[in-house]
């Protein structure tokens, strides 16, 4: 049972970590809590279903299922990245010099707008994501691990590793770190702040789209409100790891997933949503800045 709960926890944790990265990247750059980020994750799940339905109508699912899944995922990432870029451009950029409360209220407004937009266009009932790998998988230590779980764990790990390389090794990563440390100095040395901020939103939204697509594939059901709870939990993971810290968001997501899964398995599943916040309270009482908040200097 322990191995099964650990696998479940890593699966959930990978998803939380991908969403938490979007929160922590935006906070690191703008010191803004982007409450609309959970809705980008929700859009990723819906877009996955829409594109799969489109490819089913074209006959691509029957002809080549992996290709249809990959294309659906890529298109979901592209569209969600576009949403993230547009939200930053329309809702946050005009308020960049405004008091900090203004963009925060704008973020809440965008979140509510996106929820209602999806509810009105897609309906208030649950949408079904086809179970392509429902009962298939492999045995690890006498525990059944489904291909969907393996896929989520592997994709999450690969994306987190690629993001780490992007931040550490590329020019845009260095620019993002520079902007997060001192916007004025970064601007004086020739870094285009608007471009860096837009790229940050695009990357974070792309990661949220992957998380949404994978969760839809894992649970098989989505609705317009899934972004709210997942967003709150991912934000909790980002705060747990030290908001603004990339490694902190990754670790916070994994810890949160493991705690939720183990607690649901060994204590009670009825309060599984509460364990995340209990853990957050304990960590913040012991270390208010989060696990990596004070000691880790790298943030974006």
Image (cartoon, helix red, strand yellow):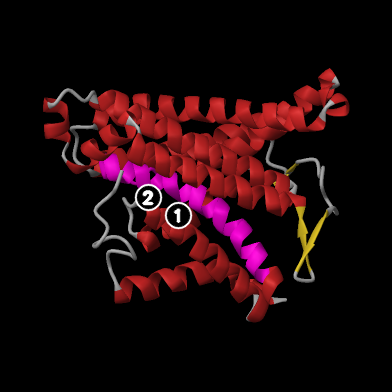
Q: Please determine whether, in this image, residue 59 is positioned above or below residue 244.
A: above
Task: Name the main secondary structure of what is drawn in magenta.
Answer: helix
Of 219 and 199, which appears nearest the observer?
Answer: 199
Task: Pick out the residue farthest to the bottom.
Answer: 267
Residue at figure coordinates x 19%, y 35% from the top left = 98
Percent of width and height locating residue 66: 77, 33
Residue 246: which numbered mark, if any? 2
Percent of width and height locating residue 92: 32, 31
Write down the region rendered in magenta: 5-34
Residue at figure coordinates x 29%, y 48% from the top left = 299
Residue at figure coordinates x 25%, y 44% from the top left = 101
Percent of width and height locating residue 56: 82, 25
Q: Please determine whether, in this image, residue 192 is positioned above or below residue 144.
A: above
Residue 250: which numbered mark, if any? 1
Which quarter of the picture shows residue 191? Answer: top left
Of 5 and 157, which appears nearest the observer?
Answer: 157
How much space separates mark 2 and mark 1, taking CA atoms?
Answer: 6 Å
Whether residue 115 appears in this view of the structure is no
> Quarter holding the N terminus?
bottom right
């Amino acid at each position: 049972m322990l191995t099964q709960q650990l696998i479940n926890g890593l699966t959930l944790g990978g998803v939380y970590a991908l969403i938490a990265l979007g929160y922590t990247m935006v906070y690191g750059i703008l010191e803004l809590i982007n409450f609309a980020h959970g809705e980008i994750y929700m859009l990723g799940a819906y877009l996955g279903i829409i594109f799969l339905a489109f490819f089913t109508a074209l006959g691509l699912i029957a002809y080549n299922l992996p290709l249809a899944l990959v294309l659906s995922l890529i298109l979901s990432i592209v569209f969600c990245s576009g949403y993230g870029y547009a939200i930053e451009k329309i809702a946050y950029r005009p308020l960049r010099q405004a008091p900090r409360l203004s963009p925060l209220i704008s973020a809440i407004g965008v979140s509510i707008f996106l929820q209602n937009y999806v509810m009105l266009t897609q309906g208030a009932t649950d949408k079904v994501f086809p179970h392509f790998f429902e009962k298939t998988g492999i045995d690890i230590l006498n525990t059944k691990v489904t291909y969907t779980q393996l896929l989520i764990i592997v994709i999450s790990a690969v994306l987190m590793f690629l993001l780490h390389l992007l931040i550490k090794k590329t020019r845009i990563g260095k620019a993002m770190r520079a902007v997060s440390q001192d916007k004025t100095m970064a601007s004086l040395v020739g870094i285009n702040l608007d471009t860096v901020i837009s790229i940050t939103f695009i990357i974070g939204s792309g990661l949220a789209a992957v998380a949404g697509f994978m969760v839809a594939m894992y649970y098989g059901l989505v609705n317009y409100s899934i972004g709210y709870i997942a967003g709150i939990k991912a934000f909790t993971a980002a705060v747990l790891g030290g908001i603004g810290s990339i490694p902190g968001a990754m670790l916070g997501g994994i810890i949160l997933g493991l705690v939720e899964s183990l607690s649901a398995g060994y204590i009670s599943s009825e309060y599984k949503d509460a364990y995340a916040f209990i853990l957050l309270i304990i960590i913040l009482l012991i270390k208010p800045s989060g696990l990596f908040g004070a000691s880790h200097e790298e943030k974006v």
